[in-house]
Image (cartoon, rainbow, N blue to C red):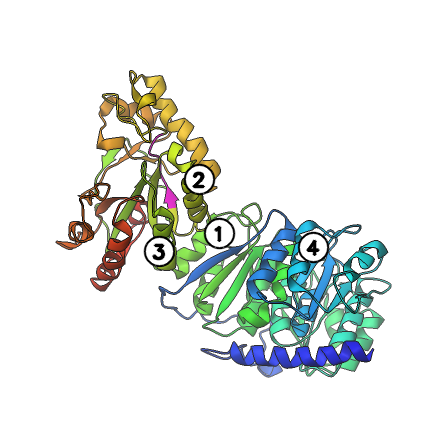
């Protein structure tokens, strides 16, 4: 197969170049210690405190389904064309579980197909990548000949299938075809469960190593043969004895020294792999759900670019030990793989809490009905620069982009009628993409004066009526359903009264529909008025320096708000203040 192997050689040169480019900070991977120093149970590495960085970012790579998510991962890390593309089944993990290190060796992304079709998202990404060669992992039981014909239409040289009698043979064949020489290390994981092979795939990829599979109680002959050909100096065996028993480790030790990386479960094993293989100060790392395989499989192919591990989330939280490992890794970027259905928004929020300068915070424990102008009793220097969204929205999207780019955590108070305009949907889309930075409160539907009647924005007509309890309740509850739909976030139990007008009766009514906190302000920029200059806004916030716990009122459609923020944010930071959400302040 000369054509194939010549291309592999060029891909190896690319991988080496990527490795050199990715080695800022400490070494790309932790040095491999002598076997005598390997821990007997799991891996223990002391946590190193990492500095919170203004440059830290969280990016979610997601799509409508696993096929679109894999395409999003491909676009992020391979913005140009790609000579190679590796294809695996998006329905069955068995044949494709070793695809990540194979794709990494080829400098290729991993995309998914069904047994009988090429999904639209995959087809569109193939159109963009314009591959010369496509490598398909899996036999006809997982990917049909018809799909092979379809895939061949995207290449000049056709699609090539690597198959075998079973998943073990497929992994061995992929290793033999792509890792044509000997290797320093090889990775082995159970072929009967997928998690260890996928989190280990990132480690294997960054070390230029293959991922091979074993039965829980024996080493398949085809795997033993391939390992002897590879002649590794070390075999990393992934998972505890419940996944791969001691007899397998002993048989592998006849081929090369074996080091087992394991934990009590898939989450702990992912942490053990990360601690053993990856050094500190990573350019990036990834987090994927521990409940399913596609996102981690597509992500593992890109470890040569992130130079970091894949860690697993447990539904909507971080498993024990993950926070310490995030601090030790201290990545510049954390990629969340998959949409909120796979990795809910609380996960990036918790990552941001560990590594960012601020975070969206959590709802207050105190549910007393009260009006709040300032947060008292704080132990850190923070203020909340809040932004209402009830009228003019010109320039609002640019303000949100500035907040994202400069890691400014913010509480927004939109009216639902403005949020559901074309400008508003763009703004809410930007907010929704970064739930780790932002939270959303309620500013009613129509911006009516709920005490006296009147008001309204963009029209006064809905507010020319008596403010009955039923109408007041609907202004909050109807707005909440729209804001949830547009932001993808639970709405905080905060409401901001239009015009700042409320009384105890209105407070009682809105508390009955879930809004006990009437959020006022202690500084008003009056930025809604076109006569207010940029300097007026700056002075309103900075002169004098606001006290810790200050809540600033501003507006997304303020005439000069965007320009003023470019002075306000760095100046407050130079004075030791952090701009954050109301909830984050309340948590301190």
Tell which tag, 3 or 1, sits nearer the viewer.
3
Residue behind mark 1: 347
**Observer able to see residue 150:** yes
Where does the magenta region start and end? 439-444
Q: Considering the numbered disc 3 on the image, is that residue within a helix, a strand or a loop?
A: helix
Labelled disc at residue 402: 3
Residue behind mark 2: 422
Quadrant assignment for the N terminus? bottom right
Q: Earlier in the sequence, mark 4 or mark 3?
A: 4
| Inter-mark Cα distance, 3 to 1 | 23 Å
Position of 27 with respect to 361 (left or right) is: right
Coordinates of residue 43 in the picture (x, y in percent):
55, 70
| Inter-mark Cα distance, 2 to 3 | 20 Å
Other-residue count near label 2 (Cα within 10 Å), few / some / many at <14 / 14–19 / ≥20: few
Foreground: 18 or 32?
Answer: 18
Other-residue count near label 1 (Cα within 10 Å), few / some / many at <14 / 14–19 / ≥20: many
């Amino acid at each position: 197969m000369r054509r194939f192997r010549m291309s592999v050689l060029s891909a190896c040169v690319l991988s080496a170049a990527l490795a050199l480019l990715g080695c800022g900070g400490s070494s790309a991977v932790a040095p491999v210690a002598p076997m005598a120093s390997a821990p007997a149970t799991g891996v223990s590495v002391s946590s190193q405190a990492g500095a919170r960085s203004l440059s830290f970012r969280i990016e979610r790579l997601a799509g409508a389904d696993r096929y679109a998510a894999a395409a999003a991962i491909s676009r992020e890390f391979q913005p140009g064309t790609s000579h190679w593309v590796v294809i695996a089944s998006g329905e069955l993990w068995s044949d494709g579980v070793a695809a990540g290190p194979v794709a990494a060796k080829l400098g290729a992304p991993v995309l998914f197909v069904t047994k009988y079709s090429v999904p639209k998202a995959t087809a569109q990404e193939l159109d963009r990548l314009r591959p010369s060669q496509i490598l398909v992992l899996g036999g006809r039981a997982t990917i049909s000949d018809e799909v092979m014909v379809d895939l061949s239409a995207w290449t000049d040289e056709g699609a090539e299938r690597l198959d075998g009698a079973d998943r073990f043979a497929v992994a061995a064949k992929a290793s033999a075809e792509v890792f044509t020489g000997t290797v320093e290390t090889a990775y082995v994981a159970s072929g009967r469960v997928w998690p260890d092979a996928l989190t280990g795939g990132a480690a294997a990829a960054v070390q230029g190593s293959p991922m091979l599979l074993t039965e829980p109680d024996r080493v398949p002959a085809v795997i033993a043969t391939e390992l002897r050909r590879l002649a590794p100096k070390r075999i990393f065996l992934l998972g505890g004895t419940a996944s791969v028993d001691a007899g397998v480790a002993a048989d592998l030790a006849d081929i090369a020294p074996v080091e087992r990386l394991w934990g009590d479960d898939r989450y702990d094993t992912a942490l053990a792999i990360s601690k053993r293989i990856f050094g500190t100060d990573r350019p990036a790392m990834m987090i994927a759900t521990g409940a399913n395989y596609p996102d981690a499989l597509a992500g593992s192919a890109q470890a040569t670019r992130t130079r970091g591990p894949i860690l697993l989330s447990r539904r909507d939280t971080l498993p024990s030990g993950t926070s310490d490992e995030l601090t030790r890794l201290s990545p510049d970027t954390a990629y969340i793989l998959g949409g909120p259905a796979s990795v809910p928004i609380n996960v990036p929020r918790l990552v941001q809490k560990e590594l960012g300068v601020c975070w969206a915070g959590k709802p207050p424990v105190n549910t007393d009905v009260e009006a709040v102008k300032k947060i008292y009793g704080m132990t850190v220097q923070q203020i909340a620069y809040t932004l209402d969204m009830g009228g003019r929205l010109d320039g609002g999207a640019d303000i949100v982009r500035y907040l994202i780019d400069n890691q400014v955590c913010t509480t927004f108070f939109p009216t639902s009628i403005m949020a559901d305009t074309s400008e508003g949907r763009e703004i809410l889309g930007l907010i929704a993409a970064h739930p780790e930075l932002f939270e959303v409160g309620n500013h009613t539907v129509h911006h009516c004066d709920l005490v006296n009647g009147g008001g309204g924005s963009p029209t006064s007509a809905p507010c020319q009526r008596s403010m009955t309890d039923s109408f007041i309740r609907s202004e909050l509850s109807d707005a909440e359903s729209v804001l949830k739909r547009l932001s993808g976030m639970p709405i905080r139990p905060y409401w901001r009264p239009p015009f700042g007008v409320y009384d105890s009766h209105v407070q009682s009514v809105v508390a009955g529909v879930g809004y006990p906190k009437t959020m006022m302000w202690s500084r008003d920029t009056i930025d809604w008025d076109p006569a207010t200059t940029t300097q007026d806004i700056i002075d309103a916030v900075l002169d004098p320096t606001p006290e810790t716990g200050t809540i600033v009122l501003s507006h997304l459609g303020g005439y000069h708000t965007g320009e003023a923020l470019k002075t306000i944010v760095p100046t407050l930071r130079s004075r030791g203040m952090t701009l954050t959400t109301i909830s984050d302040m309340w948590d301190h």
